[in-house]
Image (spheres, rainbow, N blue to C red):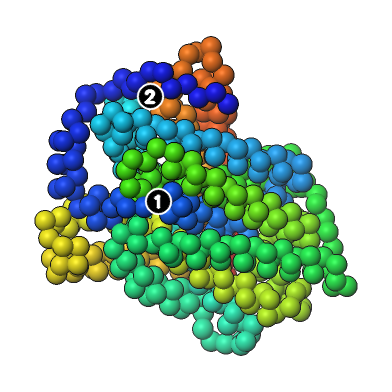
Amino acid sequence: MTIHLKQQLLAPEAPPPQENKSIRQEDAGAAFVLESKGEWWHAGFHLTTAIVGPTILTLPYAFRGLGWGLGFFCLTIMGVVTFYSYYLLSLVLEHCEKAGRRHIRFRELASDVLGSGWMYYFVIFIQTAINTGISIGAILLAGECLQIMYSSVSPDGPIRLWQFIAMVTVVMMVLSQLPTFHSLRHVNLASLFLSLGYTFIVVAACIHAGVSKNAPPRDYSLEDSNFSVVMSAFTSISIIAAIFGNGIVPEIQATLAPPVTGKMFKGLLMCYSVIFLTFYSAAVSGYWVFGNKSSSNILKSLLPDEGPALAPTWLLGLGVIFVLLQLFAIGLVYSQVAYEIMETRSADVNQGIFSKRNLIPRIILRSLYMIFCGFFAAMLPFFGDINGVVGALGFIPLDFILPMLLYNMTYKPSRSSFTYWINIIIMVVFSGVGLLGSFSSVRKLVLDASKFKLFSDDVID
């Protein structure tokens, strides 16, 4: 695909490089949380953790609303479009850096390129909603993992889901004190291996379940009514968009030591190699075995409430442990934007990152943020539905629409060029998908709301 790199950005006049540098020196969010020391492989670790998480265990659930053919098609299209989108976004960031305006935040980039102050607040609102939603989802799923392990040992034990969520929240409060995004590089390398580990475990468990004498009956039929089929399909598309979603590419690119030219492309290649291995294998194996009975967490399908486990318990237990450990890394990655916002206002860049002046506010604010996320995770256990809403309202605008718009505004490719029109088509199609996905996802959330109570002990599918 030809990328046109001929024309420069037409936007409000930016400060000269030395002034930009001076501003950064007074910006604790940039100096501390988003310090720029990383290499391309560190970006690959961050990207992989941001995209390849336990949400891939929701892919069989997404397939049940699409069927085999449409499920494969949507999974592939989402993969191609997001890789293309993130690559374009990295090119825009590189272009601005060469012009003397290095942007380390999505909101600053959108406001600069589009020349509109309201875009700054639009992006920060969407990013905050996404990051908080994912942090809530990570804590919720981690609590569910603990509940699964506990139930296998003590089926009638007294500990409830909200108590496991509280345990996870305490651990997250401790881990949240890692001061910078770059300091997560080793955590995110471990996260990459964990994602490969539990994916292969789940695939092996699904194959075992599918060929065993206790294999569940397979039904790949869709909903009965046409309206329900359409709504389920758009909910599934929103879920896949959320699974591929990122929303923090500029913040990840900010962790790279300048110059950043070409580094994000290498990081994306690393990330999407892992995506190819994990997404397709988890989706195919899970949907093959459970069909339209797939749970929003395929591990729950393999460990049904009634009857024996459909795979060796020790194998599933190991998979649950891997998922649990990676969830801590995911919660940390998606909390970085919130921490950067808080520390931009609360920290003093003229004092050390571990000085008493900066350490005490960091401990208090980050702990309060985790308590907030943990409270809502315990109160609203809607894991599958939250994915759909977040995908439609958050990831689709940031990952499927804005990067193409920013690229067209920055490089201004000819209106007769393939690049220009493919970008326009992607924006139009996914705007429609986002609107319909929002409606279908909110509709399902409302329908499921009648089936649960606050601080329920069960996660609603």
Under circle 2, the secondary element is helix
| The N terminus lies in quadrant | top right
Q: How many marks?
A: 2
Of labels 2 and 1, the one closer to you = 1
* Crowd rating for badge 2 (residues with CA inside 10 Å; few <14, some 14–19, many 20+): many
Residue denoted by label 1:
39
Q: Residue at x 48, y 36 (%)?
A: 87
User: Can see residue 231?
Assistant: no
- Residues at marks 2 and 1, CA–CA distance in whole angstroms: 26 Å
Q: Amino acid at mark 2?
A: Thr
| The C terminus lies in quadrant | bottom right
Q: Compared with residue 105, is residue 98 higher up or lower down, i.e. above or below?
A: above
User: Can see residue 314?
Assistant: yes
Under circle 1, the secondary element is loop
Q: Compared with residue 72, is residue 170 higher up or lower down, i.e. above or below?
A: below
Q: In the image, 359: left or right of 213?
A: left
Task: Where is residue 355? Give x, y as percent.
Answer: 15, 67
